[in-house]
Every structure is written in structure tokens, then in C-alpha cells.
Amino acid sequence: MIDSSDRQILIQHRIVRVRQALEAGDPVPLEELLMIRDLQGQMVPRKPAAGRTPREAAVLILLYPQDDDLWFPLTVRSPHLPQHRGEVSLPGGSVDPEDADLVATALRETHEELGIDPAQIEVIGTMSSFYIPASNFQLTPVVGVTTEAPEIVPNPYEIDSVLHVPLRLLLSGETIIEEEWTLHGMRLIVPFFAIEGYKVWGATALLLSELAARLRRLG
């Protein structure tokens, strides 16, 4: 076993690695991401239709220390919501007029969904913005850290439950599965993370796979 001081050093080292991964300027090749493909292996385009203006949105990958690893929460959306009901996602949502920027959006939405005070969170970077056709969002992932595991109080209207996931689970690749699904009348190959009996797919899988790919680059 490692003592508390060694554990703190290890956690700080892991946070430094995440910072370095986010600061690396080169984009992650699309083939390293969990992107939906057609049956010929071609990636499904992610761009708005002509004349359709996307809405800006942001999500938060919130890393916190537990044991000797960094963990992050995923939310299982309420079955009563109008969109993406029952799906697993990162806390976040669309920009409100009072938001100063996309970071403010991610922090506000995390507070609304999980009850975490934004003052507890240190933002350490962002990743690539992606278009989400189903919701017409241009989605920006924000990455933040807390010094200890936050107290989470889920909003019962929006959140059915919360999954707590160790970062090492993304890096191992052991939970990645692909299946053929029918989406919008098309047969597609859908990659996902299998986590605690849930299929984490779509935009959430895409963003998490980018973070994992950036960390793997560091060796």
C-alpha cells in the first residue's frame, strides 16, 4: 500500500499528464476516436445540414481523486426527458444568455445537474468541438479537476443515476465494444464503452475516446 503523501504525489502527477495531453496541439486522428461508421467502415459525417445553424453547448469531464486514480462522473439521463432519455452522458447543456463563455456553460450545467459548486472546480483545458446532429449542438468538452471527490446531489428531474468511472478504464480499451444498430433508418456500426451495464455511445463516447487518445500519446 502507498501512504497518503505518496498517493497525493501520484494524483498530482496524473493531473499534470492530463494538462499536458490537453495542451498538445495536434488533433487526434479520427480513426482513433469512437465514431459511428456505415457498414463499409466510412465514418458518418458530423456537420449541420445546409441552412441549419447549430446551437453552442458544452459538457464537463470532471476529474477527481479517489484511491490512486482520477475518476469522473457520468450521468444516466432521466427517462422523462424529451431528448436522449435514458442515455449516459457527461454533465452539460446549451449556452444560456448569461453565460460568459463555454466554460461558464459547462460549470453552470454541472451545478444544475449534480449540485457541484463551480468554485470547487479548477478548469485545466478544453478539447475539440464536435457537431451533434441529433440535438443540433456544436459541443465543446471542458476538462476540470477537484482536489477531492465532490459531494454529488443529482437533480431528480434530469438525472436518474450517476456512474463513477476511473480514468484507467478508458485507457485500457477493454470496455470498447462495437455493434450493428439501426439509427434513423440506417444500419450502422456503433462503438461504445460498456460501463456498469450501460452502453456509453455517441457524442459521449467520442469525447471520452479523444481524452484517452491524447493521454496514450504521452506514453
Image (cartoon, helix red, strand yellow):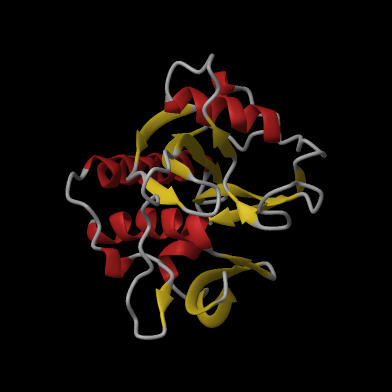
Above/below status of 134 relative to 190: above
Residue 194 coordinates in the image, percent (x, y):
59, 71
Q: How many marks?
A: 0
Question: As displayed, is residue 159 above or below residue 123?
Answer: below
Q: Is residue 207 positioned above or below 143 on the image?
A: below
Q: Which of 119 and 89 is in front in this view?
A: 89
Q: On the picture, is 199 further left or further right than 41?
A: right
Q: In which quarter of the image is the C terminus?
A: bottom left
In the displayed image of the protein, which residue is found farthest to the front?
Answer: 51
Residue drawn at x 29%, y 43% as measured from the top left:
22
- Residue 15 on image: x %, y %: 38, 41
Closer-to-camera residue (68/90): 90
Residue in view at x 38 percent, y 48 percent: 130
List the single residue furthest toward the left.
26
Estimate the x, y position of residue 1 in percent, counting from the top left.
53, 57
Residue at image point 44% right, 40% down: 54
Q: Which of 92 and 45 is in front in this view?
A: 45
From the top left corner, tell me how far across and down residue 29 is, in percent: 23, 62
Task: Say which quarter of the image contains residue 116.
Answer: top right
Drawn side of residue 158 relative to residue 205, left or right: right
Q: Which residue is drawn at 41% across and 40% down?
A: 140
